[in-house]
Image: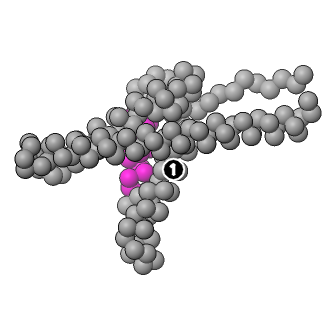
Amino acid sequence: MDVGCWVFSFFKRELWVRVAQLAKFCLVGASGMVVDMTVLYLLSDPTTLAWNLTAAKICSAEAALLNNFVWNEVWTFRDAAKQAKGGWMRRLVGFHAICGFGIGLAVLLLHLFHTWLGINVYLANFLAILLVTLWNFSMNAACNWRVRHAPCTTP
C-alpha cells in the first residue's frame, strides 16, 4: 500500500471514529439536560423541596456534569479512556475545567449574537450551544480522552 493511500485511509477511519464520538457526545449531553431539569425540579419546585433557585441550579448543573462525565468515560470515549494517561479523577477535573470554560464561552457568544448582532435570543442561544458543543467535544477529545495510535509501520 502506498503512503498516500494509507494516509487517506487513516484519516477517513479517524474521521468516522470522531463523527461517531460526536454523535454519542451529543446524546450524552441530551441525557445531561434531562438530569439537570429533573434535579432542578426536585430541588426548587415549591411542591418538592423548595430550595433557593440559584442553589438548586448549581446542584442540578453539577449533577448533569457528573452524569455527562460518567457516560462519556464509559461509552463515548471508552477505548480512549483505557489508553489515557492519568486516572479518571484527572479527566474529571479536566472535564470540569473545559465545560466550565464552555459555559463562559456560551454566555459570551449569546451576548455577541443577540446584543451586538441583533439575532433573536433563542436563535442566538441555539448557535452558542452548537459552537460550545463543538468546543467541549474537541477539547475533551484532545485533552481528556486523546486516542494514541500505534506508530506507523509500512508493509
Looking at the image, the residue that sits furthest to the right is 2
Tell me which residue sits at (84%, 23%) in the image.
153
Q: Which residues are magenta?
A: 93-105
Tell me which residue sits at (65%, 27%) in the image.
148
Q: Position of residue 20 (x, y in %)?
A: 59, 39
Q: Position of residue 87 (x, y in %)?
A: 46, 22
**Quadrant position of the C terminus in the picture:** top right
Tell me which residue sits at (9%, 43%) in the image.
48
Q: Is residue 39 visible?
A: yes
Q: Is residue 109 magenta?
A: no
Badge 1: residue crowd in 10 Å (few <14, some 14–19, many ≥20): some
Q: Position of residue 66 (x, y in %)?
A: 34, 34
> Callout 1: helix, strand or loop?
helix
Q: Is residue 110 visible?
A: no
Foreground residue, 78 or 83?
78
**Quadrant position of the N terminus in the picture:** top right
Q: Is residue 53 left or right of residue 115?
A: left
Using the rendered view, name the quadrant where residue 94 is placed: top left
The amino acid type found where label 1 is placed reads Trp
Per the image, the residue denoted by label 1 is: 135
